[in-house]
Image (cartoon, rainbow, N blue to C red):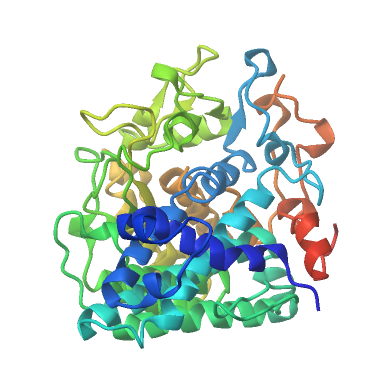
């Protein structure tokens, strides 16, 4: 039985991540000999490995750039700048829908980084019960590790597997590495993949400590954040009642008063809406390769991705919408740079800003969509959730209050998700999960290098998801994604 290269790498990579964080290891052990006991022997050491896992998730190959940028440029709302500005081309294959198993943009980097993070988290979970230390701290570490592992697998599933709406539980899922020593060379079904994700999240929610909601506490995953992630997962799984159930659990502790409004809307660190975000400072910032620099060309930023006119028009629908204020001048001389991420005051570099994972506004939109799709409360409750958010995003609520029904209501919710969650890792994923065709007007993409045949992509086309990197298929013998 062959062993996939990512499985070979995971344990060593996991230990190296911890090793880089520990001065003791560097002085006690040659760098070519790694002792597991130095990593897993105590709760405190596993806590440091957990901290390293948060950092791995924030790397540029995952949430620090690749996934969020991919979600933007494959959608109708963003594009690369015109070719005369010579944008970097290492991620343009996604924008142009030209991926293949051998030329797949950032697929290999994302795949490897995610399984590296999973390897770290498996190492924690394999050893936390036996490690010496405080029991309360032990439970907290275990819960956070389980929840983070589920989140990583979910992001892999929505990127490398067809959406639930296509074939349901029988579709191709992921290779699930369940522990450090588990050898896996086959893909599970999508049903088994989702079951594993949900089991991890639900188990984590039962053992994690109660939320404190202190300043900056949302940089760690919490019980409320786990409920929010569960509502997101169930939304993708089209289990509307469960999506609503977990959204309501969030709204029991965070409500309308915590939503930013037209006067307080400012996309900075640890806002009142923050449920979980990754902490980025000068030590782990990616600078010009980070998320913020992809959309802002000022002071050395790349600014290679800008809003399409379609998205600009959508942002300007509501009177006084603070989200439209995020538009600023781009390198083409237009007002289409959508600058959601900026350096915090006093910071240097280009991407010293936190990365949001899930916010309260998304939970309101999940609850609205679940109800519009038939969950308890139906359309009346869907409108209530939706209008709670809209009221906070316009200075003239009476003119823009939602009153649609049936399919028009679902479309209104989808539009609100586009406005509210832009550049937060949704974009194209919302279109894919709902089984819609991807429609990109030619006028939005003039002189950007996109082939006219790739402007519009059919729902469920293999072009909508990443292929598993060819090197992984060759090493493990697992089945490639259908269509590649």
Q: Tell whether 310 sits left or right of 135.
A: right
Q: Position of residue 38 (x, y in %)?
A: 38, 70
Quadrant that contains the C terminus: bottom right
Task: Please tell me which residue lies in front, 313 or 183.
Answer: 183
Q: Tell whether 482 sits left or right of 180.
A: right
Task: Please tell me which residue lies in front, 268 or 10.
Answer: 10
Q: Position of residue 131 (x, y in %)?
A: 33, 83
Name the residue rendered at 67%, 79% in the picture.
183
Q: Is residue 380 visible?
A: no
Name the residue rendered at 46%, 20% in the picture.
297
Q: Position of residue 460 (x, y in %)?
A: 76, 59
Q: Position of residue 143 (x, y in %)?
A: 35, 78
Q: Is residue 12 visible?
A: yes
Quadrant that contains the N terminus: bottom right
Name the residue rendered at 73%, 29% in the picture.
442
Q: Quadrant of residue 24?
A: bottom left
Task: Please tell me which residue lies in front, 467 or 120.
Answer: 120
Task: Please tell me which residue lies in front, 109 or 10.
Answer: 10
Query: In the picture shown, does residue 373 fall above or below 351?
Result: below
Instruction: Please give the count of numbered marks on the rendered protein.
Output: 0
């Amino acid at each position: 039985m062959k062993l996939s290269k990512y499985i070979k790498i995971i344990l060593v990579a996991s230990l190296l991540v911890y090793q880089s964080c520990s001065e003791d290891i560097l002085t006690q052990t040659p760098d070519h000999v790694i002792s597991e006991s130095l990593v897993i022997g105590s709760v405190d050491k596993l806590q440091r490995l957990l901290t390293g896992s948060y950092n791995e998730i924030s790397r540029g190959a995952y949430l620090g750039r690749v996934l969020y940028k991919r979600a933007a440029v494959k959608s109708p709302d963003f594009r690369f700048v015109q070719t005369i500005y010579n944008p970097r081309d290492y991620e343009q294959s996604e924008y142009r829908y030209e991926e293949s198993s051998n030329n797949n943009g950032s697929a290999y980097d994302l795949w490897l980084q995610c399984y590296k993070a999973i390897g770290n988290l498996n190492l924690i979970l394999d050893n936390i019960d036996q490690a010496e230390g405080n029991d309360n701290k032990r439970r907290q570490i275990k819960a956070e590790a389980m929840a983070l592992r589920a989140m990583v697998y979910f992001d892999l599933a929505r990127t490398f597997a067809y959406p639930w709406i296509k074939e349901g539980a029988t579709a191709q899922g992921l290779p699930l590495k369940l522990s450090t020593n588990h050898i896996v060379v086959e893909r599970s079904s999508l049903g088994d993949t989702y079951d594993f994700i949900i089991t991890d999240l639900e188990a984590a929610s039962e053992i994690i400590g109660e939320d404190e909601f202190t300043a900056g506490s949302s940089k760690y995953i919490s019980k409320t954040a786990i409920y929010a992630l569960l509502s997101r997962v169930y939304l993708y799984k089209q289990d509307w009642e469960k999506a609503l159930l977990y959204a309501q659990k969030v709204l029991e502790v965070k409500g309308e008063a915590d939503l930013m409004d037209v006067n307080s809307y400012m996309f900075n660190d640890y806002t009142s809406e923050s449920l979980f975000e990754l902490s980025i400072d000068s030590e782990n910032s990616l600078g010009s390769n980070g998320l913020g620099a992809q959309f802002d060309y000022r002071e050395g930023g790349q600014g290679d991705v800008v809003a399409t006119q379609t998205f600009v028009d959508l942002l300007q629908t509501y009177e006084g919408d603070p989200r439209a204020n995020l538009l600023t001048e781009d390198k083409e001389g237009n007002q289409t740079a959508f600058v959601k991420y900026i350096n915090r005051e006093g910071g240097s570099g280009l991407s010293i800003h936190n990365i949001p994972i899930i916010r309260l506004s998304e939970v309101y939109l999940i609850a609205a969509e679940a109800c519009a799709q038939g969950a308890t409360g139906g359309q009346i409750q869907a409108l209530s959730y939706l209008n709670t958010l809209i009221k906070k995003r316009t200075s003239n609520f009476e003119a823009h209050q939602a009153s649609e029904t049936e399919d028009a209501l679902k479309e209104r919710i989808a539009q609100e998700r586009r406005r509210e969650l832009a550049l937060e890792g949704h974009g194209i994923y919302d279109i894919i999960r709902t089984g819609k065709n991807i429609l990109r007007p030619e006028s939005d993409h003039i002189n950007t290098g996109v082939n006219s045949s790739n402007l519009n992509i059919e729902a469920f086309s293999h072009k909508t998801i990443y292929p598993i990197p060819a090197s992984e298929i060759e090493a493990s013998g697992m089945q490639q994604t259908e269509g590649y």
